[in-house]
Amino acid sequence: MCIHIHKLKRVFLMHKSPCLQSLPSPIHSPSNLTLTLVNRSLQQGFCFNILCVGETGIGKSTLIDTLFNTNFDSPLCSHFHPNVRLKAQTYELQESNVRLKLTIVNTVGFGDQINKEDNYRPIVDYIDAQFEAYLREELKIKRSLFNYRDSRIHVCLYFISPTGHSLKPLDLFTMKRLDSRVNIIPVIAKADTITKSELQKFKLRLMNELVINGIQIYQFPTDDETVAQLNASMNGHLPFAVVGSTEEVKLGNKMVKARQYPWGIVQVENENHCDFVKLREMLICTNMEDLREQTHLQHYENYRRCKLKEAGFKDVNPEKKSLSVQEAYEFKRPPTLCNTEVPDLYSTDSYKSKSY
Ligand SMILES: Nc1nc2c(ncn2[C@@H]2O[C@H](COP(=O)(O)OP(=O)(O)OP(=O)(O)O)[C@@H](O)[C@H]2O)c(=O)[nH]1
Ligand SMILES: [Mg+2]
């Protein structure tokens, strides 16, 4: 299967492990150590979980097939359900010695209902359920996090309709509910259906609306000097305007992925036509590791903190002295972990007045 795993390998090699940075000066040569760690990670393989949120027929499956240069054969889903459902499919991809477990989670029926107010709920529940499963594993006496099948969502591709107007209340409401739980990368779907000048204005308006409504989208990190410049410039292109197609068209003497129209072709991988290449580079190559890290260090950490607090765990006693493990458990009050609800981290009152 031809995917861009050769680039993933480069990312692994580029990624600076924090434990390497904190090691005292040379026990082994750093290059040997780096290689050992890289090889171990490569052998072990790694997982990457993508959530695609977007209205029915907006181009979710086509974009994923285009990104990974394959046909995932996503099963046709019935759209005659009263609620939004989530469908997860896992694929094992391998190129040379790199193994990637890729899970694609798709929303089915998102935006189909007359009353869309609860459309976000199954998505939030799904994300939380994956955090919950991880937390339970972590809290087990005999835990096996090393070979734990991590299903936490690393990135949410949020598909925006190319209306040229503004974000729909459904989009605002859903993104607001998701932004404290997952790294959101917004994409303007079917960008071949909007003109270049409209697209520029649309992008600006969308970013403005996200800021006004306090919605945090994922920012490509600029703290690592090897990718700082690239990431900073890519942040300025958000939301990416994408076109998906697995159809190949002959252009000169080579075949290119494109959408063919009576008046010409839109080339998916031509940066003058759309931002598909930018998205692929950022998602699969440059920032895959950071997305995984942010999921663990920021979003899962939020979930874990709320859940343990709710369950009555404490780090310090009323005199602000740290507690032993025994004392921490004594502070824990019933009901136990299983029955507690995680409160929403952000209030969404500001959206309640919006009509659907
Ligand atoms: N113009 C245009 N059409 C697209 C693009 N991507 C997909 N399509 C078309 O849109 C239709 C729906 O695409 P899908 O990828 O099946 O959309 P989806 O979001 O997965 O649909 P559901 O799974 O049913 O919700 C198909 O006819 C695609 O060929 C695009 O970038 N531009
Ligand atoms: Mg689909």
Image: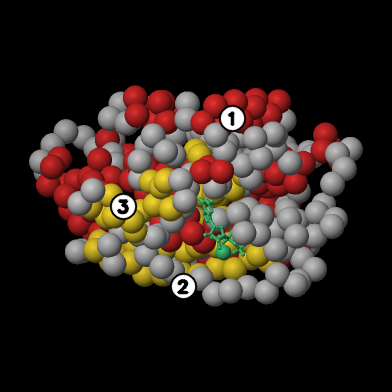
* 24 and 347: which is toward the camera: 347
Q: In the rendered structure, which amino acid carries the disc numbered 3?
A: Val
Q: How is the image coloured?
A: secondary structure
Picture quadrant where residue 147 is located: bottom left
Residue occupied by mark 1: 198
**Element at label 1:** helix
Q: Which label was assigned to residue 256? A: 3
Q: Quadrant of ligand 1?
A: bottom right
Q: Give the number of the disc on residue 73.
A: 2
Seen at 29% across and 55% down, the residue is 250
Q: Real-space Cα distance between discs 3 and 1?
A: 26 Å
Earlier in the chain: of badge 1 and badge 2, it is 2
Q: Marks 1 and 2, Cα distance to the nearest angstrom?
A: 34 Å
In this rendering, the label closer to the viewer, 2 or 3: 3
Residue 249, label in figure: none
Vertical side of 190 occupied by 215: above or below: above
The amino acid at mark 1 is: Glu
Q: Considering only vertical position in the picture, is 89 above or below 248?
A: below
User: Exactly how many numbered labels are in the figure?
Assistant: 3
Element type at mark 3: strand
* Nearer to us in this view, 310 or 48: 48
Mark 1: give few (<14), some (14-19) or many (20+) Cα within 10 Å.
few
Secondary structure at numbered mark 2: loop
Using the image as rendered, state which of residue 138 and residue 239 is in the foreground.
239
Residue 313 visible to an observer of this rendering: no
Pointers 1 and 2 in contact (CB under 8 A)? Answer: no
Residue 38 position in % (x across, y down) = 22, 52
**Dot 3: few (<14), some (14–19), or many (≥20) neighbours within 10 Å?**
some
Q: Earlier in the sequence, mark 2 or mark 3?
A: 2
Circles 2 and 3: CB atoms closer than 8 Å:
no
Contact flag, marks 3 and 1 (Cβ < 8 Å): no
What's the residue type where badge 2 is placed?
Answer: Asp
